[in-house]
Image: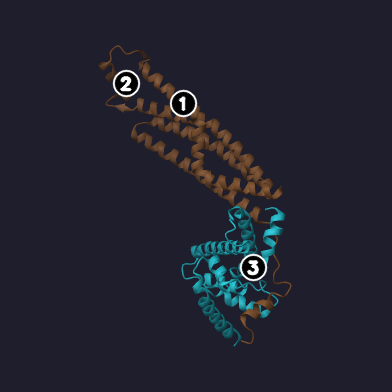
C-alpha cells in the first residue's frame, strides 16, 4: 500500500475505522490487527470502487465486513476450545479511553449484537438512514425504529452500570 | 443518565488519545510467516503420506503378486522423500529475523530450487513407475508361469509370424518405449500439475503477498 494512498484515501476516514474496530475488539493487539486488516482490504479492493456510492460509505462497508469476518474467525477459533456457549470477553484494562463515560458507552455497545453495533456507531457518526442501510445492506425504512430500540437498550445497560 | 449517548460520543472523542491510528507495520511479517508455516506443514504431511503409502504398497504388492512393482515403487519414493526431506531442512534454515520481503524472497528461491529438482526427478520417476507396473505384471504368476510369457504364448497362437526380441513381441517393446519417452518428456508437466493441485492455493497467496509488498516498496 503506497503511503500516498494511505494519506489521501484512508487517513481522512481513520476516525470511523478506529471507532468501528474498537467496537468489535477487546484488546489493543486485536484492535491493531483489525485496523491494519481493514486498511489493507480497502487498498486491495480500491479498484472495485465504482463510485456508485461515496468513498466514505465504501470505506465503512469494507471496515464493517472485515471486522465481522475477523470476529467470526475468532469465534470459530474459540469454539474449537470451548464447547459451551461463548461468554462475552472482558475488555483488557489497558484498552480504555481516558474518558470514563466513553468507556462505559463502548462497553455497552460491545454487548449489542454485531449488526446493532454497526447501526448505532454509524448513527452516532451522523450517517443518514439511507447511508446506514447502504452500508449494512438493509431497508432504510427500518433504520429509524432500529436506532430507537438500540438507544433504549444502551440506556438500560448504562443505567444499570451507573446505578 | 444525565448525558445523552450522542453527547457522550461527541465529548469522548474530543480527547486527544481517543483516535490514535495504529501504525501499519507487522501485518506482512505475520502473514508471510503464517503462509510459509502452512506450506511447511503441508509439505511435511505430504512426505509422511508418501512414506506411509510406499510401505503399505510394498506389503500389498507382495500379496497381490507384483512384488517387483512394490520394490521399485518403494525405492523410487524413498529417494524422492530423502531429497525432499533434505530440501525441507534447508527451508528451516531461512532466517525469520529478516524482513518479510527478504523472507518471502528467500522462500521463493527455495521453492524454485525445489520445483526444479523435483521436475528433473519426475522425468525419471513417472517412467520408472510405469516400467515397474509392466515388470510387476509381466512376472506375476499365472498358473505356474509368468503372466507376460502366458500372454505372449496366447498372442503367438493368433499371430504365429509376429517378430519377437528376447521373447517379447516387437510391437509391445515399441509401444512401451513410446509411452516411456512420453512420460519422460511430460514428467515435469505432470509434476507441475500435481504440485498445483496440492499447493496451488498457498503459492497463489504467496504471489499475492509478494506483489503487495513489492507495490508497497515502490
Which of these two is toward me, B44 or B206?
Answer: B206
- Percent across and percent down for residue B70 are 41, 33
Q: Colour of chain A?
A: cyan
The reply to whether discs 1 and 2 touch (Cβ–Cβ < 8 Å) is: no
Q: Specify whether B140 is left or right of A95.
A: left
Q: Report the coloring of the rendering.
A: by chain
Which of these two is toward me, B169 or A6?
Answer: A6
Are dots 1 and 2 on a single chain? yes
Label 2 to label 3: alpha-carbon separation: 81 Å
Label 1 to label 3: alpha-carbon separation: 61 Å
Mark 2 belongs to chain:
B
Q: Specify whether B10 is left or right of B35.
A: right
- Percent across and percent down for residue B41 are 54, 48
User: On the image, numbered disc 2 is attached to which residue?
Assistant: B149
State whether residue A66 is above or below residue A155: above
Mark 1, secondary structure of its residue = helix
Q: Which mark is residue A16?
A: 3
Residue drawn 59% across the image and 42% down it: B88
Mark 1 belongs to chain:
B
User: On the image, numbered disc 1 is attached to which residue?
Assistant: B182
Mark 2, secondary structure of its residue = helix
Mark 3 belongs to chain:
A
Can residue B98 be seen in this snapshot?
no
Spot the brown chain and give its letter.
Answer: B
Residue drawn 69% across the image and 69% down it: B19
Label 1 to label 2: alpha-carbon separation: 26 Å
- Within 10 angstroms of label 1, few (less than 14), some, or many (20 or more) residues? some
State whether residue B131 is above or below residue A66: above
Quadrant containing the C terminus of chain A is: bottom right
Mark 3, secondary structure of its residue = helix
Give the quarter of the image for residue B23: bottom right
Q: Specify whether B198 is left or right of B66.
A: right
Amino acid at each position: 500500500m503506497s503511503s500516498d494512498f494511505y494519506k489521501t484515501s484512508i487517513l481522512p476516514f481513520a476516525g470511523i475505522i478506529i471507532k468501528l474496530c474498537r467496537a468489535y475488539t477487546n484488546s489493543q493487539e486485536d484492535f491493531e490487527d483489525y485496523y491494519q486488516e481493514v486498511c489493507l482490504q480497502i487498498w486491495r479492493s480500491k479498484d472495485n470502487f465504482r463510485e456508485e456510492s461515496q468513498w466514505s460509505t465504501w470505506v465503512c462497508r469494507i471496515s464493517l465486513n472485515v471486522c465481522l469476518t475477523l470476529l467470526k474467525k475468532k469465534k470459530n477459533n474459540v469454539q474449537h476450545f470451548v464447547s459451551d456457549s461463548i461468554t462475552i470477553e472482558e475488555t483488557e484494562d489497558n484498552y480504555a479511553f481516558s474518558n470514563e463515560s466513553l468507556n462505559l458507552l463502548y462497553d455497552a455497545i460491545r454487548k449489542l449484537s454485531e449488526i446493532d453495533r454497526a447501526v448505532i456507531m454509524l448513527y452516532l457518526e451522523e450517517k443518514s438512514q439511507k447511508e446506514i442501510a447502504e452500508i449494512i445492506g438493509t431497508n432504510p425504512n427500518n433504520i429509524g425504529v432500529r436506532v430507537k430500540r438500540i438507544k433504549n437498550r444502551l440506556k438500560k445497560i448504562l443505567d444499570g452500570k451507573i446505578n | 443518565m444525565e448525558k445523552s449517548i450522542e453527547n457522550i460520543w461527541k465529548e469522548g472523542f474530543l480527547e486527544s488519545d481517543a483516535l490514535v491510528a495504529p501504525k501499519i507495520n507487522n501485518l506482512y511479517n505475520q502473514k508471510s510467516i503464517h503462509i510459509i508455516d502452512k506450506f511447511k506443514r503441508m509439505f511435511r504431511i505430504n512426505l509422511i503420506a508418501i512414506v506411509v503409502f510406499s510401505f503399505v504398497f510394498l506389503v500389498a504388492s507382495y500379496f497381490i503378486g507384483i512384488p517387483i512393482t512394490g520394490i521399485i515403487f518403494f525405492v523410487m519414493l524413498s529417494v524422492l522423500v530423502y531429497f525432499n526431506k533434505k530440501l525441507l531442512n534447508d527451508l528451516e534454515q531461512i532466517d525469520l529475523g529478516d524482513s518479510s520481503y527478504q523472507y518471502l524472497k528467500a522462500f521463493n528461491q527455495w521453492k524454485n530450487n525445489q520445483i526444479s529438482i523435483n521436475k528433473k526427478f519426475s522425468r525419471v520417476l513417472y517412467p520408472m513407475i510405469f516400467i515397474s507396473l509392466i515388470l510387476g505384471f509381466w512376472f506375476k504368476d499365472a498358473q505356474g508361469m509368468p503372466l507376460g510369457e502366458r500372454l505372449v504364448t496366447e498372442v503367438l497362437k493368433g499371430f504365429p509370424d509376429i517378430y519377437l526380441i528376447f521373447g517379447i513381441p516387437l510391437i509391445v517393446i515399441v509401444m512401451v518405449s513410446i509411452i516411456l519417452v512420453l512420460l519422460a518428456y511430460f514428467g515435469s508437466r505432470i509434476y507441475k500439475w500435481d504440485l498445483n493441485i496440492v499447493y496451488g492455493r498457498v503459492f497463489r497467496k504467496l504471489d499475492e503477498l509478494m506483489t503487495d509488498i513489492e507495490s508497497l516498496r515502490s
